[in-house]
Image (tube, coloured by chain):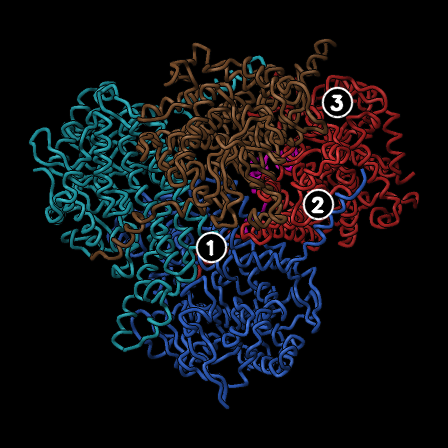
Chain colours: A cyan, B blue, C brown, D red
Amino acid sequence: MGIRTGQQYLDALNAMTPEIYANGEKITGGVADHPLFRDSARSFARLFDAQHDPAHHDDVTFASPTTGEAVNASFLIPRTEADLARRRAAFTAWTGYSHGFLGRSGDYMNSALTALASADSFFAKADPVYGERIGAYYELARENDWLATHTLIPPQVNRSASASRQAGGRVTAHVADQTGDGVVIRGARLLATCGPIADELLVFPSTVLRGTPEDAPYSFAFAIPNDAPGLKYYCRAPLYHGGSAFDEPLASRFEEMDAVVVFDDVLVPHDRVFMLGHPELCNAWFTETGAGALMTHQVVTRTLAKTEFYLGLASEIADTIGISQFQHITEDLAELINYTEIERALLRAAEADGQLSEDGVFLPRWDTLNAARNWYPRKVSQRLPEIIRTFSASGLMALPSEADFARAVADHNADLDTYLQATNGTAERRARLFKLAADASVSGFAGRESLYEYFFFGDPVRMAGAQVNGYDREPARARVRALLSEEL
Amino acid sequence: MGIRTGQQYLDALNAMTPEIYANGEKITGGVADHPLFRDSARSFARLFDAQHDPAHHDDVTFASPTTGEAVNASFLIPRTEADLARRRAAFTAWTGYSHGFLGRSGDYMNSALTALASADSFFAKADPVYGERIGAYYELARENDWLATHTLIPPQVNRSASASRQAGGRVTAHVADQTGDGVVIRGARLLATCGPIADELLVFPSTVLRGTPEDAPYSFAFAIPNDAPGLKYYCRAPLYHGGSAFDEPLASRFEEMDAVVVFDDVLVPHDRVFMLGHPELCNAWFTETGAGALMTHQVVTRTLAKTEFYLGLASEIADTIGISQFQHITEDLAELINYTEIERALLRAAEADGQLSEDGVFLPRWDTLNAARNWYPRKVSQRLPEIIRTFSASGLMALPSEADFARAVADHNADLDTYLQATNGTAERRARLFKLAADASVSGFAGRESLYEYFFFGDPVRMAGAQVNGYDREPARARVRALLSEEL
Amino acid sequence: MGIRTGQQYLDALNAMTPEIYANGEKITGGVADHPLFRDSARSFARLFDAQHDPAHHDDVTFASPTTGEAVNASFLIPRTEADLARRRAAFTAWTGYSHGFLGRSGDYMNSALTALASADSFFAKADPVYGERIGAYYELARENDWLATHTLIPPQVNRSASASRQAGGRVTAHVADQTGDGVVIRGARLLATCGPIADELLVFPSTVLRGTPEDAPYSFAFAIPNDAPGLKYYCRAPLYHGGSAFDEPLASRFEEMDAVVVFDDVLVPHDRVFMLGHPELCNAWFTETGAGALMTHQVVTRTLAKTEFYLGLASEIADTIGISQFQHITEDLAELINYTEIERALLRAAEADGQLSEDGVFLPRWDTLNAARNWYPRKVSQRLPEIIRTFSASGLMALPSEADFARAVADHNADLDTYLQATNGTAERRARLFKLAADASVSGFAGRESLYEYFFFGDPVRMAGAQVNGYDREPARARVRALLSEEL
Amino acid sequence: MGIRTGQQYLDALNAMTPEIYANGEKITGGVADHPLFRDSARSFARLFDAQHDPAHHDDVTFASPTTGEAVNASFLIPRTEADLARRRAAFTAWTGYSHGFLGRSGDYMNSALTALASADSFFAKADPVYGERIGAYYELARENDWLATHTLIPPQVNRSASASRQAGGRVTAHVADQTGDGVVIRGARLLATCGPIADELLVFPSTVLRGTPEDAPYSFAFAIPNDAPGLKYYCRAPLYHGGSAFDEPLASRFEEMDAVVVFDDVLVPHDRVFMLGHPELCNAWFTETGAGALMTHQVVTRTLAKTEFYLGLASEIADTIGISQFQHITEDLAELINYTEIERALLRAAEADGQLSEDGVFLPRWDTLNAARNWYPRKVSQRLPEIIRTFSASGLMALPSEADFARAVADHNADLDTYLQATNGTAERRARLFKLAADASVSGFAGRESLYEYFFFGDPVRMAGAQVNGYDREPARARVRALLSEEL
């Protein structure tokens, strides 16, 4: 069928019967129409619609190799540098709607599936059938234009113990049984971001396995429909409070609900099991298949858009209240420019220095992208809201709501217009801008973004360890030994 | 009458008729019972009640010099170091309820009034009558146990221009007329924190006057009751969303509403005018009267309590999820300990090195407190939520609401109990703790705290300039010149 | 004649008669043999020799378009992306000797000349003759394989005043007279790095001109031989103390002397004057000609090599004393990896996104390189020595000299061998490594490097201002306005 | 005999015969006259002389309880807060000479001895004789006005292994034998700062013992004269290069040589053995005896002086070259003021909140001082030179030597005078100031200071762990639990 429209996506969502708990209720009726999910579902719908929009169609889609119909470009298996640029153009087109605030737009998991479907040599180390199954699943996902979420980490019972040692090993999702029909999963995982409004759930290997036999029951990869029997989503308290686009400009559009996923003896049919056991291969799942590379390629495109957004936001604020000429404002703007350009360069260089994998996939250079995903959470993500706060100051708290402005009009009361005007803008325009600044720097939505970006790929401390282990420092060390051994 | 009870405070609040706009409505009926203000008013009421609680009475009160009745200890004019310790004990007792999250508890403005009421030599530079008036007002405030808010800075129309040059000079509150009855004020000021639930509004000199004749109309100090005709409060959108103490543990208790203050030709009677004109004295208002010293003494006591709270919170989290042994966790805990001890030392040293003013008031050492108030916003306040986020990680987002737990009980559903348990606590206990962590690090309440503390005393960049100008660097410079000139 | 050998360079140096003051003496005799300059001259000689070394010849040279003889590849006018890669390969080959510690290796100024010689449309704005002159000079430099230094900034009399207002305008180098033979220059400039051992001095426009008529006498660009009459170099105190390569491994090789340049009525012949007057063009000298782009392309290649060197050094230290498994060590290593990869990406992306100039030169993308040169000084350069200190700790101070080791051998004293051994190395090997660490993190040489890199392109604060002014933020701002104006 | 003069100290030094290796030679002849040690010995001599200077005598000395003669005030056993103030006044008087650059002025180790001599209850846990011995040694030190150095940490063979596991346990100083005369020590320790010019060497317990029986041979405390047979000092390469006070203003005065200490079967007589075995008591040596408190009290007084020196230096530079009005300069000055005031407050508060120990010693509050010594190395010490570099910029490298100025005078050459003048000072005055700036921010001396302060009390990472373990976080945690359990 190829690319869907937004309406098709929303209809499909309403036709599903997932088990979702949120805000003290068990969700019944169509998810896409539920107040908690309606607005964010609509934002995802816009992404589906963009596929049909002539302005984006060519960037966002390509012709399916099986049907010739248009399918999303994030499913394009890259064979050349140009293919990577093609994929990036698709990601970028969508950021024109999300500005980087949708961390789980479909292209993210699609990128993983695209790499995995082509990683035959990896799966052959366990059993080629896994490669065949995920290949078939990839085609289904591509042709049905599914939106998939995923869930990765074990519950946080005791962060100093492994899954098998947490509360007797029963808490973390694990293989409880194997039957003729498939594998039975029991236990929980955190966090399925935008889980409630997805079509499918991917459950890939948690990367914190120790690779010991003890960890075998926790070693697997599979996919299930979002309304598979026994699958339950427990949502966090919502961060969008139902306000207008004026009052909650980001939360109203981009609230991606996070949910704890509980597997209450969920049967996963064999053809949806992509790995079982093999802790050591599970630990290599993202790096050796190229999934990490293609996913990070999408992520850096996304964070570049987000950093640009903050650069634009800071610039608009500076102009609106007349602070552009202050030295510390200029220095902060320059800092945002630097981050923007660095992310752009990392992306571009990863493509330019990409290489063909053993399986003939042209992957962006991993060391480059790995640096990007280790650097951004620590050095950039936390600075973005900080800079907006510094620019906006008390302006973020002198902010009546849209209803207050409406009432003032009704009352013929000019106070707000007079006293909240800006040097370069009316009170209404300025309030709209500062509401956006608030949602980007001090609101609950902003706080969740800070957390989300910081931990996007996992605990930065553990990630640093993995990065050092996986990086070839020998050329750098050889420099030092060369100098030490040379005669003057 | 001396100290009030919480109920007396709430009753008085309900008896007033302030003009307040919030959330699209004009508030009518009793403020203390309005859903937007009820909970925070109740938190302030607890502070009033604590004055009567035998556990705190002796710390929090002293005998009025005029009536002998107990009045709040923040009104005690310090004559000795012991008096400063006395005042600190009172501030500290109240932080047992607020944990530093109430930035406008009554002792803050009371401290200003106490200093001003004793600063005869300062007021004599303009006209001794100002000193007499503020002395009388101080007595009224003390004996009636009023809660006062204040409002300080001009609207943010154009931050690169002075008040007199903003939108024709009409926007910033200014003297519009003088009549036989008093002074007529027109224009606006930002931000009256907890304005809607105060008894009185103090309008003190904005410290960004240039001291030129052009600034004379913006130069004044006065007090008015909160329901003075023509006085209007325009509230920001609320950050407390009506959740339970479980779901919004800090916002439900400590949401201090911020409001833009509009003076629509407010008549201030002469006896409430404490300064008029004299831009140069207005600029010296806080430093030369000792008001800055006594206010900062209160503030540092408050931020110490808050830093302790974060140290405690981080410690509880670390234990609950078993991360105490990780090196970076230990380093962050040590950092919090250092900040706690530094603030404690600054407070203690300011007292120990205090000095009698010209007017016989024993003021804490200003250079010490000035360092405290310049250092904390930049180096401490932004780190506190950051550390909590680092400790809590995804735990902050795997958080169902209280209603979800209740429903689970009703449904006999053990999922949450099982999967959200902690190594040292039940799921419910852990959720309660992490909700608190969320409200202290990622919620809208937390975001507003970050902003509020960073800008508490004004723009840190400007403050640094003032600090350097006011500090005697000669002894330090003499060291350098001595070394340069000495023979080896 | 094309590429010179090291010996030819040294001979030429000895044949010159520059006026140099250093360490209380006026240098007489051959500069290349003087103890103060001998060692660094020899390091530069190695770079010349590398041009003839078969291992590097193809990377470092290309065939002169006029003679067909090999000339240095930094003179290659880039017409394609491949040419940029070619230039980078040449820069990189030389960093195999300098490891980024020679800030003024010949390829730096050669890059400037190469761009300027091709910037006809820029010079046409003043007078095409300037373009012709610098084109001719470029050919001379290329064919004679000259080593040029340059000098850029006015003396630091009063950093808050412009050149024309410093001490009556007499201090900063300016046009004192114009004669039929040329232009007479009087005054001083800072700092000619490695001036004493260069063949030529380039004096390019100081970038802090205000572009006013008052600044015309300070607006010029020219070149003179290093022993032009009236030209004087006043050297700073040396940082290399004459120790062996063991004791001063970096200073002995890479001490680039910095000198104040005094022009005591130096006559610059007309054909060496490349610009006169035109303050506004002088201010655009580096950006509009492409000189900035080609120079920065060389600089980032150099700082990449240097960052790699520190990564290698840190890794060697960690292994030698057994600290690799500590978490904070791993985090620092990851940080160095990130910086290395970011610099590599900036370089690569600037090439991949380069564009043809109006004059047909393929210039690397300026926004990318501008980010690189604004980011590195602030965020990377100061961290490098800091990390080495953290790794090495007291090991940097438990370091006898080479003579002590020699004496121990002579005395059959095994103390040093026993007590300074490392877990992965003998005492001698470890001392050699830690001496290098000391010269890279705590010695006077290391201190000068910190300063040099931080201020390489000028005051970072001013640079940030220029960067913001020159950057197109409109696309970023358009993002924000699009979101604000869209319907939900 | 009581306080010595500088000459007496120098004469005693020359009369000793320590075994010192430095710069490839074995030192022979009087240490006090050797070029490597002469200048720093003279700086220490000035401290001795200051004891007799009427301007300081009363601050620096007190009457010996045994002889009534004046002895150094750092030997005063504090019984009251006033005694602590007395001790601080003495430390402060000496910083008028050292400005905090002498890390091993006598008052440092004297403070340790003073606490130990009074810690009877601690020594009683092992054997009261230890307390008696150290009491007697303290008296000798006090009455003879000895200068003691000490040495604390094991060689850095393998930082991930304990002493007993380093190279077979033979490298670290340990008990090799016990005889009727005493204990025989073999092995090495790092680093004895200013060891070569001390009278005595104190060898106190290394704080990195694990408290296991395996560590018993490494568990001891003793003192020996600096020329005890078998004791050898291996000096690091010198950082003072023999320049004048103009050229090396700090290194010439304050170079404290660091030396590896080798014990080649050194016999320590029984009465100089203050502890033997008891690893658990050795680990508590500094905290439980009050030695840590009195030493840190001295150290914070010293670092306060140093921070003030940098504040003065930065201020002098700013004025000299006219940069005081730049915003980032102001912010850096404010930062230095904050650090100065924080250190002053920590010191003052530690005294004001001091308490009597079990043994009747009035000790400054440990939590306060512990925060000071954990905070300063990380947050302050590395910023000091950084700020000086930012202020001075290229001025640090445009610096001819004193000899160059002398030669210019001889040659009647006015170039330096003209071109290096400052807006507020002659070229000579400015050069003198900037030479000081260089020695405080970029020289080898400055580099060693950065390292020294960072690691003064040990590895900051380990120290953080110890601090957290020793700190009572229960009151902070109780705050959190109180809030969680209270009803709204």
Name the residue: 58% across, 14% down.
Answer: C11
Name the residue: 63% across, 31% down.
Answer: C232
Whether residue B23 is visible here, answered yes or no, is yes
Query: Mark 3 falls on what kind of element?
Result: strand
* 2 and 3 marks on the same chain: yes
* 2 and 1 marks on the same chain: no
Name the residue: 57% across, 51% down.
Answer: B340
The amino acid pointed to by label 2 is Thr
Q: Residue A50 vs residue D270: left or right?
A: left
Determine whether label 2 and label 1 are within 8 Å by CB: no
Q: Residue D311 location, x and y as percent? A: 65, 48
Q: Residue A173 vs residue B450: left or right?
A: left
The amino acid pointed to by label 3 is Tyr
Of mark 2 and mark 3, the one earlier in the sequence is 3
What residue did someone put label 3 on?
D233
Q: Which residues are magenta?
A: D448-474
Whether residue B2 is visible here, answered yes or no, is no
Which is closer to the viewer, label 3 or label 1? 1
Query: Mark 2 falls on what kind of element?
Result: loop
Which image quarter: residue C344? top left
What residue did someone put label 2 on?
D426
Q: Residue C238 location, x and y as percent? A: 66, 28
Magenta stretch: residue D457 in it?
A: yes
Q: Residue D105 location, x and y as percent? A: 77, 38
Residue B77 drawn above or below residue D246: below
Query: Mark 1 falls on what kind of element?
Result: loop
Residues D65 and C345: in front is: C345
The amino acid pointed to by label 1 is Phe
What residue did someone put label 1 on?
A326
